[in-house]
């Protein structure tokens, strides 16, 4: 008989492997469809965020719990990070993991005005949790407005 802890660990492992598999297939299909590698774009985005935060590659690698050479390869588009690694990097950059998942093609981009989404994400007065809640509410309002709008049909 499995203990609850063993059951949860097994489920988490299963979900992680599924997310990694799906992320790989999505990234591959994005690369095939656009001719551009999603790996490079997420690496470029990570580098931009790191530079904007004025954090060295070595410091981000340490806070994210990944090796310096591996993070360098991710930034240069030579490695495709797993969802778990992206979440660690996001924590190190103090941004939402969802943002990196979108850049990597794991999640669909949010609907709505990109400027509004960017303004919410870039507001230093908001915690990551507050940003996530605001983005979710904003997306809900946008969807409801589109559904009720006569032009939507």
Image (spheres, grey):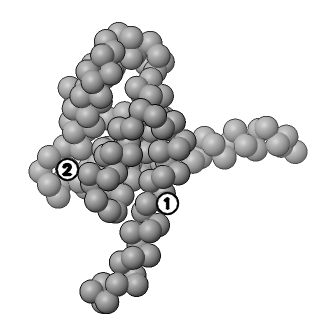
Above or below 130: residue 71? above
Q: Quadrant of the C terminus?
A: bottom left
Helix, strand or loop status at disc 1: helix
Which one is nearer the viewer's eye here, 119 or 1? 119
Q: Position of residue 77 (x, y in %)?
A: 22, 31
Q: Can residue 116 be seen from the camera position used here?
A: yes
Q: Residues within 10 Å of mark 1 (few under 14, many from 20)?
A: few
Residue at which label 2 appears: 31
Residue plotted at (35% across, 10% down): 58
Above or below 138: residue 24? above
Residue at which label 1 appears: 137
Q: Residues within 10 Å of mark 2 (few under 14, many from 20)?
A: some
Count of marks placed on residues: 2
Disc on the earlier residue, 2 or 1 = 2
Helix, strand or loop status at disc 2: helix
Please name which of the two marks, 2 or 1, marks the residue nearer to the observer.
Answer: 1
């Amino acid at each position: 008989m499995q203990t609850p802890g063993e059951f949860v660990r097994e489920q988490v492992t299963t979900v992680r492997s599924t997310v990694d598999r799906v992320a790989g297939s999505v990234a591959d299909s994005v690369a095939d469809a656009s001719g551009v590698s999603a790996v490079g774009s997420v690496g470029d985005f990570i580098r931009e965020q790191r530079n904007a935060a004025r954090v060295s590659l070595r410091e981000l690698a340490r806070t994210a719990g990944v090796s310096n050479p591996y993070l360098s390869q991710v930034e240069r588009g030579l490695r495709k990070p797993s969802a778990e690694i992206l979440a660690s990097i996001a924590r190190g950059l103090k941004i939402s993991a969802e943002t990196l998942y979108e850049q990597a093609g794991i999640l669909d981009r949010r609907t709505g005005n990109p400027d509004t989404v960017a303004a919410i994400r870039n507001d230093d007065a908001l915690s990551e949790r507050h940003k996530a809640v605001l983005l979710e509410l904003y997306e809900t309002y946008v969807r409801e407005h589109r559904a009720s709008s006569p032009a939507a049909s």
